[in-house]
Image: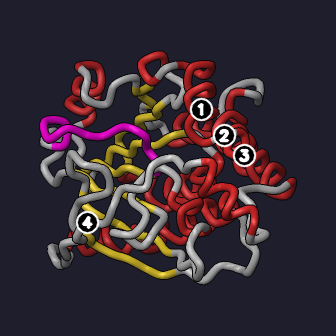
Amino acid sequence: MRIALFTLEAAPSAEAVARFLGRHAAQVVLIGRSDPFRPGAGGPLRQGWRHLRRSGPRLLPFLLANYSLPRLRPGPTRLARLAALHGIPLHEVQDVNGPETAAALRAARPDLILSCHFDQIFSADTLALAPRGGINLHPSLLPHHRGPVPTIWALAEEAPRFGVTIHRLVPRIDAGGILGQREVALPAGSTASAAARALHLAGVPLLAEVLAALEAGTAGETAPGLLPYCPFPTPALLRGIAARGQRLMEAADLRAAWASLSAP
């Protein structure tokens, strides 16, 4: 099965993407890399100001550590090196539903689109460019915690439950049918950053199972139901997390993020 992989280059998913490519590179015919600070999304300054107004200052270190580090490392990024190593075309995605991405998909002729920590919503027309449509790896137990930072929302609950879900891509955020799901026990005191890395990694073997079932025609699918969307958090939610002694990140997360983005 030919796969077009779409992702961000960011600390929460960098190691998971590398492990997936280590096992499935022969199937991957295109890598689409989204720039979270692309001009169409507001650029770094406007985005930073928007996050500050919406979530307050507590969120900014989490975002900087998890999403800005690839731009601080000189030379080719890890994802670019992996794409070159495996001879996979690397497409820079400014608009996943724009003509450039459509042309890249038509040239690559994937059977399936795979999204792993990707920040753009696929239209029905874009998904139709792959005969098998698309699937997504999401680091929560959907339908719980639909949205961009699910581990933060999990920490906000009295009894956090963590897990990973593989689901169908539809033109609505984290709303497609569930193909596979696994609850993941994390160490007590895990930060939101550490949880995000661990859950993406836990999704790699689950993803392999789902891909094998899709190829064999044995994949089961369940409707997820829809719970409320979980957007970027409010200052009040972040204060509540801090008041219970839980953290979005710590120094060890910064070191782990740098290592995950700098590894060969």
The residue shown at (44%, 80%) is 182
The residue shown at (47%, 49%) is 148
Few, some or many residues within 10 Å of mark 2 (<14, 14–19, 20+): some
- Which type of secondary structure does the marked residue at label 1 adopt? helix
Question: Are the two marked residues, 3 and 2, in contact with CB atoms closer than 8 angstroms?
Answer: yes
Q: CA distance from mark 4 to mark 1?
A: 28 Å
Which residue extends farthest right? Answer: 251
Q: Earlier in the sequence, mark 4 or mark 2?
A: 2
Identify the residue position indicated by label 2 in the image.
56
Instruction: Please say which color scheme the image uses.
Output: secondary structure
Identify the residue position indicated by label 4 in the image.
226
Q: Earlier in the sequence, mark 3 or mark 1?
A: 1
Q: Amino acid at mark 1?
A: Arg
Q: Which mark is residue 234?
A: none
- Which type of secondary structure does the marked residue at label 3 adopt? helix
Identify the residue position indicated by label 1 in the image.
53
Q: Earlier in the sequence, mark 4 or mark 1?
A: 1
Q: Is residue 210 left or right of residue 196?
A: left
Q: Amino acid at mark 4?
A: Leu
Q: Is residue 104 visible?
A: yes
Q: CA distance from mark 4 to mark 3?
A: 29 Å
Q: Is residue 144 magenta?
A: no
* Vertical side of 34 occupied by 63: above or below: below
Few, some or many residues within 10 Å of mark 4 (<14, 14–19, 20+): few
Q: Which mark is residue 58?
A: 3
Q: CA distance from mark 4 to mark 2?
A: 28 Å
Q: Which residues are magenta?
A: 117-127
Q: CA distance from mark 2 to mark 1?
A: 6 Å
